[in-house]
Amino acid sequence: MEKIELAQSLLNRFKGLEEARQPWVSSWQELTEYMLPRKNSFTGTGLTSSMRGQTGDERIFDSTPMHALELLASSLGGLLTNSAMPWFDITVRDRELGDDKDVRTFLQQARERMISLFNSEDTSFQTHVHELYLDVSLLGTAVMYVESDPKTTVRFSTRPLGEVFVAESVRGMIDTVYRRYEVSARQAIQEWGSGCSDETKRKAEDAPDEKVEILHAVFPRTDRDPFGFGAANFPYGSIYLETGTKQILEESGYIEMPYMVPRWAKAAGETYGRGPGQTALSDTRVLNAMGRTALMAAEKMSDPPLMVPDDGFLGPVRSGPGGLSYYRAGSTDRIEALPIRVDLRATEDMMIQRRESIRKIFLGDQLSQEGPAVTATEAVIRQSEKMRALGPVLGRLQTEFLSPLIKRTFRVMLRAGELPQFPQGLAPEDLEVRYTSPVARAQKQYESQGLAQTMEYLRPLVGSTDSFGIMDNFDTDRMARHVAELFGTPSDYMKPKKDVEAARVQKSKAMSGAQTTSTIANAAAIAKTLTEAHTDRPNVLTDLWKMIGGNLGDISNLLGGQAGQLAEPEAQPETETDPQADPSKLPEEMVEPQSGQPEQETTNAG
């Protein structure tokens, strides 16, 4: 009885959501008919679309809106989720914890594994995310379902908007999703087995391809135990239901919201979004009407109506190639074309204006290249300006799609054991997502430009020696790390602060040791020079002993100032003498004994 009541309450809630969505359906249907007919999931009764197998392009006379839509969707994929470059990073809120080497290694490895999963062909993320960008650009609202998979870990699926009915929380975020879709009876048995109703089991035997309508409801639980275990206490409840028989097929839950519902823009009080497609709808109507009229005018000019006398011809008038029309002999009546005066050039000019307006609405002027080839610096500046202009427009996509997508994927991979082991002291709640897409990098160019301009302005004052101590006002280590973050440098490229400090201490010791070695070597060279100096003539040695009792600082100055005298003692005139350099006044150990030898020989011996 409880399950029957639960099923009925779900159907009642679904009916309310369906009524709330009904005013949007006609607008969505018209958008798809004019711009992308294959996205029309709003026609027909029930879920069986009458558009299956049909082109649905009867209302399209100009393909400019379709091309502009495809260009915008492709550009969004290249800007936000480009498979050729990392488009997100995982960081730690606590800078001290994030500076740990093991934490940095973990974050880098986790990001690499997630990027590999997003780019894998098995998960089909790149295929489905392009369909999501088409939906959000055209209809203003898109839906992606992210579920765990035993084979690929995570599976991504973009669902048609015609299947989905949503509701917001008090904070304006989508927290309730009801999805109504169809599967064959055979697929229902494969998925839920004995949980299916008896009617579905009978269909699986008699008509396995007959469709069964399924309702999947995901909603926040209000009666759960936050500290309890099991799916019944997960934040989001999940129930699969057969709408025809009110048979509950599966009841479980999710830890994170599995449906991502990004909206391009949203008016106050509305639940569903509005995109560039709705803005361009009026121009699209007019453009197609002009195209139809221009085709009719051109057709009349090439095959104009004919004026035929009422009694001047025998039989029907044949206006086709080689056709023969008979008229009475001797009659002056002739077949004449009805004059058609159409200014197709004016019509084409008006159509060009509408095309340009539609391209601008779909941001074609912001996303396409403009002007001749320029230098690399100017190209970077242009690209940065365009990305900054797109930043506010794409901010909601980052909030409602990219951030929940990465967090959901990260946690599914974590529970599946596909990520490295968490370092000690790090928890999933400590992590945050930092975007490194071209849009995010362009938005951060202002910070890097401000730093560069500051340093450029102060460079003349700092000079090569910074004699004024201007750089003492800056935390250069923090500046270097911040610049690395701005330009998306991988986290494992940066050393932890304690390793940097240790390296600096080691470098300081090495420099001190080298200086000591150099001092000893200089002292040894001076001592060697002193031993080879003359003592019978004025030089640094004799002056040194004269000042031996004086200030040691004067000795040092003397050694420095007269070091050149030791190198060329022979340059002194041999006849010049100094009474202060009398060997008799030197200490006894510095004077060799006199043995009566000639003075010249004594000098040479010294």
Image (cartoon, rainbow, N blue to C red):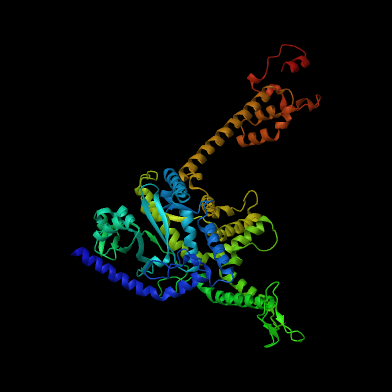
Q: Is residue 250 visible?
A: no
Q: Which residue: 81% across, 26% down?
A: 573
Give the answer, above or below, for where 307 lies relative to 151. below
Give the image location of residue 570, x and y in percent: 78, 25
Most extreme residue toward the left is: 1
Give residue 271's quadrant in the image.
bottom left
- Residue in front for this viewpoint, 117 or 407: 117
In the image, is 409 to the left or to the right of 71? left
Give the answer, above or below, for where 315 lies relative to 36. below
Give the image location of residue 241, x and y in percent: 28, 62
**If the image is split into quadrants, where does the C terminus sit?**
top right
Give the answer, above or below, for where 197 lies relative to 314. above
Give residue 228's quadrant in the image.
bottom left
Q: Is residue 600 visible?
A: yes
Q: Which residue: 58% across, 68% down?
A: 63
Give the image location of residue 481, x and y in percent: 51, 50
**If the image is split into quadrants, where does the N terminus sit?**
bottom left
Q: Which residue: 53% across, 61% down?
A: 76
Most extreme residue toward the front is: 329
- Residue in front for this viewpoint, 249 or 387: 249
In the image, is 137 to the left or to the right of 171? right
Total marks shown come to 0
Give the image location of residue 182, x and y in percent: 36, 62
- Residue in front for this viewpoint, 128 or 195: 195
Q: Which residue: 57% across, 57% down?
A: 448
